[in-house]
Image (spheres, grey):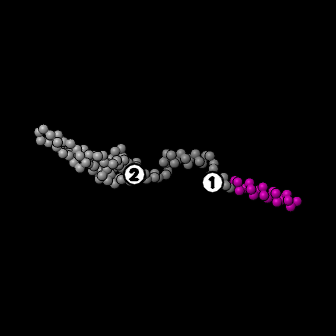
Amino acid sequence: MKKIILLCWVLICSASFVQAKAVKLGRSTADGAVWQSTLKSGNGMSEFAKECDSNCQKCDTSTGFCLSCSPDRYLSNGLCQPCPSKHSCDGKKAVPNCSGVQCIEGTSPVANATGCCCV
């Protein structure tokens, strides 16, 4: 008789633990679908701040796009790109070194690493 009572007690306890785990972990499919749709749509939850490029000086954290870069880089599609050779960069644009240079008659501007020469 004691064995039967012990066996019943073990079965009852193990069944209640399984049920408690399911409730505590929230493994119900209906609850999971509601939580996932809320997360995807953003309703009821604050948006996480998005990080920008490490060379970004001014960042739009809602989109993750950079608004201005460090002076040795230029802005392209919201990312900070390295300044190309024979260009000067101001954090937003890359301008060729010989942009707007006028040379004397018979010579033409040629860009070099630091500026422009008339050759």
Residue at 24% in and 44% down: 96
**Residue 26 in the figure: left or right of residue 82:** right
Q: Which mark is residue 35?
A: none
Q: Does 20 lie within the magenta span?
A: no
Circles 2 and 1: CB distance less than 8 Å?
A: no
Q: Main secondary structure of the magenta part?
A: helix
What kind of residue is marked 2? Answer: Cys
Instruction: Give the extent of the magenta segment.
Output: 1-19
Residue assigned mark 1: 25
Q: Position of residue 40 (x, y in %)?
A: 50, 46
* Residue found at the very far front of the displayed protein: 119
Tell me how far mark 2 sits from mark 1, CA to CA: 35 Å
**Residue 105 in the figure: left or right of residue 96:** left
Asked if residue 49 is positioned above or below residue 102 in the image, the reply reads below
Q: Give SS at disc 1.
A: helix
What is the tally of numbered marks visible in this picture?
2
Residue assigned mark 2: 52
The quadrant of the rendering that contains the N terminus is bottom right
User: Which numbered disc, 2 or 1, marks the residue that appears first in the sequence?
Assistant: 1
Q: Position of residue 85 (x, y in %)?
A: 29, 46
Q: Nearer the viewer, residue 18 or 86?
A: 86
Q: Give SS at disc 2.
A: loop
Q: Residues within 10 Å of mark 1 (few under 14, many from 20)?
A: few
What kind of residue is marked 1? Answer: Leu
